[in-house]
Image (cartoon, grey):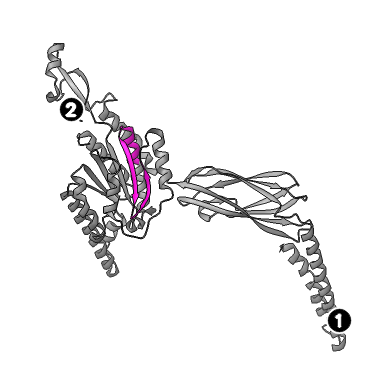
Amino acid sequence: MYVTGRLAALVGLGVVPVVLLSLAVGGSDAAGAAWIGVAAWIGVAGWVLVCVLLAAVDVSAAADPRGIRIHRDLPPRARLGVPVRGGITVTVTGGRRLRGLLRDGWEPTAGATPARHGLDIPPGESRTLPVTFVPARRGERRTAFVAVRALGPLGLAGRQAVTESPAALRVLPPFHASRHLPSRLARLRELDGSTSLQVRGQGTEFDSLREYVRGDDVRSIDWRATARARTTMLRTWRPERDRHVVIVIDTGRTSAARVGDGTRLDAAMEAALLLAALADRAGDHVHLLMFDRVVRARVSGVRGSRLLPALVDAMATVEPQLIDTDWGAALAQADRFTSHPSLVVMLTALDAASASRALLTRLPAVTARGRVLVGAVTDVLLDETAARRDRGDDLWPAAAAERTLLDTRHLAEALTRLGADAVLRGPDDLPPQIADRYLALKAAGRL
């Protein structure tokens, strides 16, 4: 049972006679005033009793809020921050008209609007209530119930009940880095010889023969074909295909640090998605591993139009774990993807030597088998903090930021000495830089 503001207003009307009588008998004798006051309070008590009876009648006349059936119409997936539409259908199975309110129990980060729906459904009929979702957080956004308030005909009180109706909406990473994909695909087509601007003499896979043009690399002349054709013929090359790109995302405690508007893990996902889309279009095999001490997500053997949906679906529910990453186990898992030489891309943090010592120890075994690219998300505010020294209070933060930047540079140099390429950028710049480094490896014939 619940009561409305209309009942409170109705009860409040009983106070008015008491106030008026008190003012009217202010100059009378004490005995008469006492009798009038007693009579007034008796009248108020009677009025409250009448209001209670009216509320009880209203409750008994209200529809049973448990006599409903709930059906949800939800989209299977939603992207972070992108509005999607759904609906909830309410069917009245009881014999009375259901008037009142319905509140759905979605998590606040699901962004479900409106939060409350008005109900006016005849018995035996259904109504579909539209819902718009604007998710504010990645992962599984859930609801477990709907709360229904059935209002009586007088509008004084009603009945309420909670009906179990579990549902979930999977919110996928936004993939803001997709804006960089068209320009990188254009560069890939140039490398592949698919546009009028053909990159000659690069790559390791033979493509075709054509006539020599002034300015071409003379080292690519095919002398046997020249002898047969009686004109100078040139070999053209294209980057090799069917290589393996293994992307390892660190989901340990360093991935939980805030950088920009998100976490390091969010930035690593953006870089992984952009690289995966580019590598797939280049004809390479893409594998994904998200790991700290156990496998949090794994995608392999998926190509073409199914790759990106599979990646974002696997990434959606992964959250940073406040534990140190076991790089030995992580790289052992990465080795299981393929026995062929491949490009291993590790997306992690390079803040402190203590957190990166395990990675540096295991890295030589990986660089001995193939190319290794380490992408680290840096905090763009560190440079600003290190440069801000106007006041005395700024010196300690500036010194700490400078120390962090120095450690990062030392770790990047250590990675280079061990045979890996290091890319250190802010959350917005890391995805395109990783993609550019991949294209550079393709153009140089090193992948």
Q: Is residue 161 left or right of residue 75?
A: right
- Mark 2: give few (<14), some (14-19) or many (20+) Cα within 10 Å: many
Disc 2 versus disc 1: distance between alpha carbons? 111 Å
Instruction: Return the residue nearer the eye: 236 or 307.
Output: 307
Residue for badge 2: 201
The structure residue drawn at horizontal position 81% and vertical position 64%, both measured from the top left corner, is: 54
Residue 398 sits inside the magenta stretch: no
The amino acid sitting under disc 1 is Ile
Can you say whether 234 is above or below 81 in the image?
above
Q: Is residue 354 above or below residue 47?
A: above
Please report the residue visible at 47 percent of the width from the left and 47 percent of the height from the top: 171
Which amino acid, mark 2?
Answer: Gly
Q: Quadrant of the C terminus?
A: top left
- 420 displayed left or right of 174: left
Indicate the secondary structure of the residue bearing disc 2: loop
Q: Quadrant of residue 302?
A: top left
Tell me the mark number nearer the camera, choosing from 2 and 1: 2
Q: Which residue is mark 1?
A: 36
Could one spot residue 174 in this view of the protein?
no
Residue 177 vertical placement versus 237 (above, below): below
**Label 1 neighbourhood size at 10 Å, few (<14), some (14-19), many (20+)?**
some
- Where residue 119 sits in the image (x, y, percent)? 69, 50
Q: Which residues are magenta?
A: 274-300
Of label 2 and label 1, which has the lower sequence position?
1
Q: Is residue 286 magenta?
A: yes
Q: Residue at x 45, y 50 (%)?
A: 138
| Residue 78 pos. (x, y %) | 49, 44
Q: Position of residue 372 (x, y in %)?
A: 23, 45
Residue at 70% from the left image edge and 44% from the top image edge:
126
Q: Position of residue 198 (x, y in %)?
A: 24, 25
